Amino acid sequence: MDVFKALTFGTKLRSAAANPLNSKRTHPAISPLRSKAISGKSGKTLDDLFSRLVGTKKSQNDPEMCVEPEDEDAMAEDESATDSQPDSDYEDAPFFDIINDDPTKNAREDDSDADGDNIEDGQGNIQLYSGTELSGAAFQPKPKSKKKNKRRNEAQRRAQIQQEEINRFRNEKSIHVEGTDVCQPVSAFEDLIARYDLDSRLAANIESVGYKAPTPIQMQAIPLLLEKREILASAPTGSGKTAAFLIPVIQTLAQPKDVGYRAVIVSPTRELAKQTFFEFERLSAGIGLRAHLLEDVPKVIKKFKAKPSLALQFDVLITTPNRLVFLLKDKTSIASLKQAEWLIIDESDKLFEAHIKGGFRDQLAVIYKACSHPGIRRALFSATFATEVEDWCKANLDNVVGISIGARNSATATIHQKLIFVGNETGKLTALRQIFRKDYTPPVLIFVQTKQKAKELHRQLKGDGVHADVIHSDRDQAERDAVVSDFRSGKVWTLIATEVLGRGIDFKGVNLVVNYDFPLSSISYIHRIGRTGRAGNKGKAVTLFTEKDAPNLRSIASVMRRSGCEVPEFMLQLKPSSGSGLKRLKRDVLDRKATRAANKSKLPVAAAPAKLQGLFKKKRLVDHKNKFRTFKRK
């Protein structure tokens, strides 16, 4: 009889669980809304029975465990029916043992299926549920906490506000980033101390060298490098790119170790490498890191061979690519880059120029392969943006972040740029003299295309009484260093240079840059005029051009327009230059005798071509090479 009652009760319970809200008579076992008022003879409530049935205990006030009956009269009938039923009938029934929510505890193996979930009577008429299944079928799931949603929404709102503030700050500083998980920039060097525990000695050195506040490139590049991200950075000339990579390198290396080179800094010219070395010495003073400026490679190899421990005593290597490749390829050298944690490439667009014969790109490939440390981090810096460099970085660097300051491939706004038409080659010297008479405020830097023209112009200016000197590739390293030193100290007022000084060299206070020869590209133009207007100071740049320069004028005019200078509209509508035009500009050299003839004529303006042609015929000068007046005697 007890078993029959239990089975009957289970059938009712199953029916109520299948559709509890639509049932006209909701069983009190699953509707304990008023269970306190309908307790049985033993004083136990229906909640107690239900808890035993489903194997869980629920609070009487828990809304999840309550199902409101649709009809109050039906509820009253249920209550009276329950009061008349003794508690012992439920307590003694084996049903509670059969449907216990732990099937492995009391259920018989022959009465359960493979999973211990459901029990059938063999004919499929009666199916009993465990307490866990019953509660899941009969009651709605617990709604998500409103407090958790509120906290989550508040956190998302704060993160969105913070990101908007970061974007606003970047826009104010003209900082453009491209990449994922880019950290926020810093607004002061003090922020580096709080966020990255900057070495106190390094912080003191930053202050002692005169860095009051970080420049835009330093604001974004330094945090990224301190977080060991690989970057491609483009910023105007004189914007502090050198310190932007030296500060993170010094901070991460921390202290000297006798394991060999742990950082490699590659510069395109000896002058720029030496300048980087001096800046490293200033910023790392008192920290103990040792830098090696690679100059005389055969001498270095001889020293390393005689005393191998010397190759391990340096922490940082600063060099040009050609010297470093020479050192790496020498079989007797023990120098290695296997411990290098940093590879910094300064003026990266120059090093990636493909048209340079036997150029930097092949040398850079050798250096890149030699840096085999698994944790190597690479960073490329330049004042101009080259598509070739960007493509290489995306293919070879790990999750690279691109940084650009201001408009790409534009000069800084602190430089006043001007174009002057001089007619032809002989008109350039006259125009230069007029510039000197009108606005000559030393120091002045003059760029020419070839070393032959540099020598000739130097003779002319010396004859005019100008304190001038010249630097080009024919002069040895000692002479070049002496000229640069004299120009920095003020002994030399005007410095004539080829492209060797067009990149990276930081001369303090250059007031005027003159492009005596038209630049071969907009990239070259940006680097040339970038020797003035540095570190926020104002400067002037004058570019002389002739009729032959017209095909290349459009690119320079575009740079000027992007920098905020006024440019005639017709210059922007000129046809782009061709490769043959660039080659012609590169080999076009003014003959010395033609220049002297123009000087003797003392023309107030550019010499007329007709007069010069007559002069050339009279002197029996003919053109053996081309029609652009590279004259020689028969």
Image (tube, grey):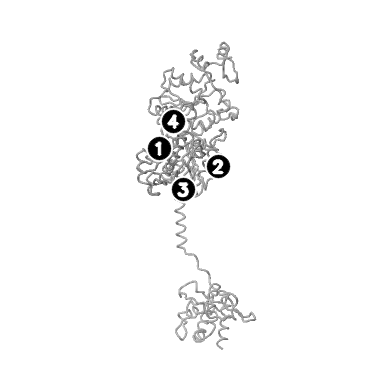
Tell me the crowding category of disc 2: few under 14, some 14 to 19, or many 20 or more residues within 10 angstroms, Cα based. few
Which residue type does callout 3 highlight?
Lys
> Mark 3–mark 1 contact, CB under 8 Å?
no
Q: CA distance from mark 1 to mark 4?
A: 19 Å
| Residue identifier under label 1 | 279
Q: Earlier in the sequence, mark 2 or mark 4?
A: 2
| Residue identifier under label 2 | 392
| Residue identifier under label 4 | 532
Q: Earlier in the sequence, mark 4 or mark 3?
A: 3
Which residue type does callout 4 highlight?
Thr
Q: Is residue 137 left or right of residue 39?
A: right
Which residue type does callout 2 highlight?
Trp
In this rendering, the answer to whether 54 lies above or below 194 is: below
| Residue identifier under label 3 | 228
> Mark 4–mark 3 contact, CB under 8 Å?
no
Q: Nearer the viewer, residue 211 or 61?
A: 211
Q: CA distance from mark 3 to mark 2?
A: 19 Å
Q: Nearer the viewer, residue 21 or 206?
A: 206
Q: CA distance from mark 2 to mark 1?
A: 28 Å
Q: Find numbered disc 1 in the image and state the secondary structure of the residue it sits on.
A: helix
Q: Find numbered disc 4 in the image and state the secondary structure of the residue it sits on.
A: loop
In this rendering, the answer to whether 83 lies above or below 454 is: below
Q: CA distance from mark 3 to mark 1?
A: 22 Å
Q: Give the label, 4 or 3, closer to the camera.
A: 3
- Figure quadrant of the C terminus: top right
Q: Find numbered disc 3 in the image and state the secondary structure of the residue it sits on.
A: loop
Q: Earlier in the sequence, mark 3 or mark 2?
A: 3
Q: Which residue of the protein is positioned furthest toward the right in this rendering?
A: 123
Tell me the crowding category of disc 3: few under 14, some 14 to 19, or many 20 or more residues within 10 angstroms, Cα based. some
